[in-house]
Image (spheres, rainbow, N blue to C red):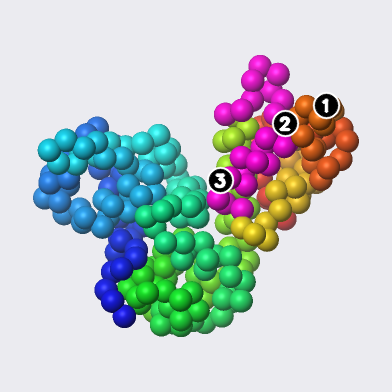
Amino acid sequence: MTKRETYPCASLEDVLTVTSLVSRNEVLRRSDALEMGISSDALRLAEILGFIEAKESVEKNFQVTSFGKQLITLPEDQQKIIIFRALLKEKNILPPYFKRLIETRDLHNKRLTSTEICDKLDMRDRWSADILNEWCRYLGLSDGATKSEVFLSSNKLTQMKKKAFVLTLLEEYKRLAGPSRLVPVAKLRRELKNSGILGKDDDFDKLLEMLLNNEANKGKIKFYPAPAKFVGLGLCGRTGYELLSLNGIISFKDT
């Protein structure tokens, strides 16, 4: 196996540290960051995940992005949702091993070593598998007994994916809602499918209907009719459910 052919060797805690540091400095030169003890991999991973961006000059000058600003203002549990979502998005630079691990149900609820993860995901190096293991442990998805063991809990993973779905739904609704506060369900369906957080086995309509039927969201989610030929299919293709209105904070609480 070759060394470091895929993932930057940086922890997710380092990503938070880098993002906070860049935010405090407004503009941070790469050389200054390295002198402060920040690793090149931590800078690279934070940049790949979209929390900081580089402005090229003689050397790289980093600035925090809007996503980075959002990340560092949230409490720790919500920071993990933001990072989880960022890791799932399609990136040409970062191989999709994390997403494949999350979506490969045959690998869930099993005690696996880094070597076995390499074999199962056909990874190029164990180094990358070790990083995957560390990320899963930080995000609270792995119940591995040791640092070299992954036990990806399907229950914890399901809960994390639901939280990421709600967060993205609320963000997209806020972005798309005009004065009427009504957004076509078809448009939200398309945006969430394009966001990368939905796996091949995840169904937007099923998840949205689960939110609708949750007592915690009573009165917060409402649907209105519209001609389907103008706004697309409503929830589960039902007539009268083409437009969506959200009011307040929604969640999968108690489900």
Choose top left, top right, bottom left or bottom right for residue 45. bottom left
What segment carries the magenta color? 175-198
Of mark 2 and mark 3, the one earlier in the sequence is 2
Circles 3 and 1: CB atoms closer than 8 Å: no
Q: Amino acid at mark 2?
A: Pro
- Give the CA distance from mark 3 to mark 1: 25 Å
The residue identified by callout 1 is 226
Q: Residue at x 32, y 37 (%)?
A: 64
- Give the CA distance from mark 2 to mark 3: 17 Å
Q: Position of residue 145 (x, y in %)?
A: 45, 79
Nearest the viewer among 245 and 194 is 194
Residue 184, numbered label:
2
Residue 118, magenta (yes or no): no
Q: Is residue 124 left or right of residue 151?
A: left
Q: Residues within 10 Å of mark 1 (few under 14, many from 20)?
A: some
Nearest the viewer among 8 and 18 is 8
